[in-house]
Every structure is written in C-alpha cells, then in structure tokens.
Amino acid sequence: MAGAREGAFRELISPFLRAKIEEAAQRFGDASPQHGALTRQYVKSSQEDFLQTSERGRHYQSEVHISFEDQPVIGVERLYKRTILIEPTTVCAAHCRWCLRGQYPIQTMKPEQIKHAARYIGADFQRDEISEVLITGGDPLMSLNLLRCTLDALQSHAPNVRTVRIGSRVPFQDPERVSGAMLELFSGYRHFRFELGCNVNHPIEFWPESITAIRRLQDIGFRIYNQHPLLKGVNDDFDTLVELYSLLRDHDIEAHYLFHAIPLRGMRHHRTSLERGLELAARISACGAFSGRAKPRYAVLSDIGKIVLYQGTVVDRREVDNAVLLRSGFKLDERRRWNPSWPIPDSVVLDNDGTMMTWYLDGTDQDENLEYPASLRARG
Ligand code: SF4
C-alpha cells in the first residue's frame, strides 16, 4: 500500500529524488534516457488516464480474512507456506507510478493490531510452518516507531520467525533515513536474520548517498537483494540491464526477480510484452557481460503468486483481450490450507492434478509516447 486512495495515486517525489531528477536533466539533458528513467518512474503521466477495462486497481488478493482470538486479523497476507507478510504502514518516501500497492486504500496498523498479527503468526497451529516474515507496506523504513513495534511484537509472540525481510526503497528515495538511530534499532534484534529488498530499476539510481545507505545496512548484517519490474523506456533494453546487474554485483546486492510489469489500471504505458521480457531474460542469462552470480529470474506476479517463466510456462494465448494462460506450481488445496480465506480468482483454471493455471493480461511493445516532455519534469 502506498498511501493512495482507491483510483487516485497522487504524485509524491521526495526532495532527494527531485534534486536527482534536476541533476540528471542538467548533466544528461531533458530528453536523455537517464532523465527519462527517473521521470517515468515518479512523475505522474496523463497516460494514466487511459484505462483498459481488463486492468484492475488491485492486482491480487492474498489478505488473510480470518478471525483469531475472536478478532479479525488485520494487515496480514499469505500465499506461501513458510512466508507471511505484514504491512504496518502505507507511507512511502515517494510514489512509484507502476507500483502494485499504489492503488490500494490507505491503511495503517495500530500497535494492538500489530501485536495481534504477531500472535497469529506465532500461533500453535502454524508456527512450525512459518519461519519468515516480509515487512512491507508502504515502506517500513518510514516509521521507526512502527518498525520497532513490529519487531518487538514478532520477537515476543512469534519466536518461530527467524528471517525478517523488509521491502524498502528508502535507500534510493531518501537515503538519509538510514540513520544511526535506525541502525541502532536493528542492531537490538540479534535473534533475526535481516534482509532488505531494495527495488532499484536503473543504473542511474546508484547515487553515492544510496550506496552509502546500502553499505551501512550491510555493515550491521543485512543481506540486500533486488527485485524490480521491467519498465518500458526505463530498463527494457539489454545494455541498461547489463549495467544494472553489474552494479548490483559490484555492491553485493543479490539479483532476485526481474518482474514483468503488472497489469494495473492506467499503467499500460509501463508494460512491455511478456515476449520482450523473455527475449531480454534469455539474452542476459546467456551473455558473458557480467557475473553469472548476478543473473535474475524472470517472473510474473500473477493473481495466484509469482510464476517464473520457463519453456512451457505459457500454455495458451487469448487474442481477444491479449491474455496468456500461465502454468504455476501452486496447488489449490495447499493454498487453502495456508490461507483458508483465500478466494479463487476468476482467472484460475485447474489442471487435472489440482495445480492452478491463471490467465494473465499481457502488455505491448508499441511505443506509447515514451518521451516525457520537459514540462513533466518533477516540479519543485
Ligand atoms: S514500490 Fe515501494 S516505495 Fe514505491 S510506491 Fe510501491 S510501496 Fe511505495
């Protein structure tokens, strides 16, 4: 969730990013790929008004709609066996135009709800299965109080949780927030192994301040990984991806997923075809231009969870709405066991062995006004 009301994802650009956008304009020019890589990520575009009926404001449904201790569990999602999500705050330092969370309604958890969620995560009936929590939102590094509350609650009520992953773009949007106070806070929880997914999309984002923030987190034991979308006009070319993955390797950041951009309402201009992503993924996997240790998996964030694309994953294509049927490895009975309230999306087709396939809306490779005019630059 990114601080948006349903259907109105307001433009929010941190002062740090505004300065970097200005710097890119002066250094490379308004029409440069470097400047475009930032404006296309953060500046609201009139193309967001072009809606496609098959796009949705909310991409998938994984919240736990469960009563525990006679109260509804709030702010928790679960799709997989060993990992559960908790979303303490909706606030972000900046709004990424393509974000999955952007069009979710505002929600911020109260301390009592966080403790209740932690007791649910550590409950007897599932504590042997769950070992990993992803704290996401919004951006969990935006509120140290909520972060402390969440970590305290997990430490007290869910001793089964050993790995805490944090989804945050703060190192690349507002790196000064990675402060001494934040590092001290994390250093107080020796029981957890901390990881941070940083979501960096383009080589230009490796600013010295961001590199320092990443290094400071690494120095207190964080493992940093990157998962990011393939974005039209930002990183949908071979050379940009090679440079991006080389930099990730240089800074000891694991390349995790390269996602096909999701079919969100008004975000068609960010989306390539699935095929274009496959071509790029095949090229970067096969090339010798950077270390094999920095090669990502190309995946789709579908209605039923992440599906990594291999030969045979695309089972069918429906021309009428440009959708593809994807084969997953998810069994419906397992999903229902991990999250009994999980509703089967309309897009699901069950295979004979109970494995789910899902229809997924493809993108296109047509150029849809890739150039952002200078007037759309971040306004100061
Ligand atoms: S990607 Fe992260 S920082 Fe960007 S809008 Fe989404 S939740 Fe916020």
Image (spheres, grey):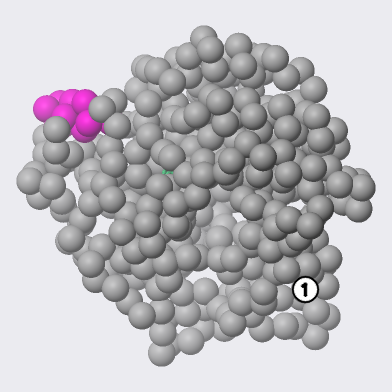
Residue 324 position within the rendered picture, expressed as x and y whole percent measured from the top left: 52, 78
**Displayed quadrant of residue 222:** top right
Quarter-of-image position of residue 266: bottom left
Question: Can I make out residue 323 in this image?
Answer: yes
- Identify the residue at horizontal 64%, vertical 19% (top origin): 186
Q: Residue at x 62, y 16 (%)?
A: 185
Q: Quadrant of the C terminus?
A: top left
Q: Is residue 283 visible?
A: no
- Residue occupying image coordinates x 79% and y 48%: 120
Does residue 46 show up magenta in the picture? no
**Left or right, 317 with reference to 69:** left
Number of on-image labels = 1
Range covered by the magenta-colored residues: 17-28
Residue plotted at (66% across, 33% down): 150
| Label 1 Cα neighbours within 10 Å, binned few <14 / some 14-19 / many ≥20 | some
Say which residue label 1 marks: 332
Q: Position of residue 243 (x, y in %)?
A: 40, 35
Question: Which residue is most to the front?
Answer: 70
Residue nearest the observer in this picture, 298 or 305: 305
Quadrant for ligand 1 reads top left
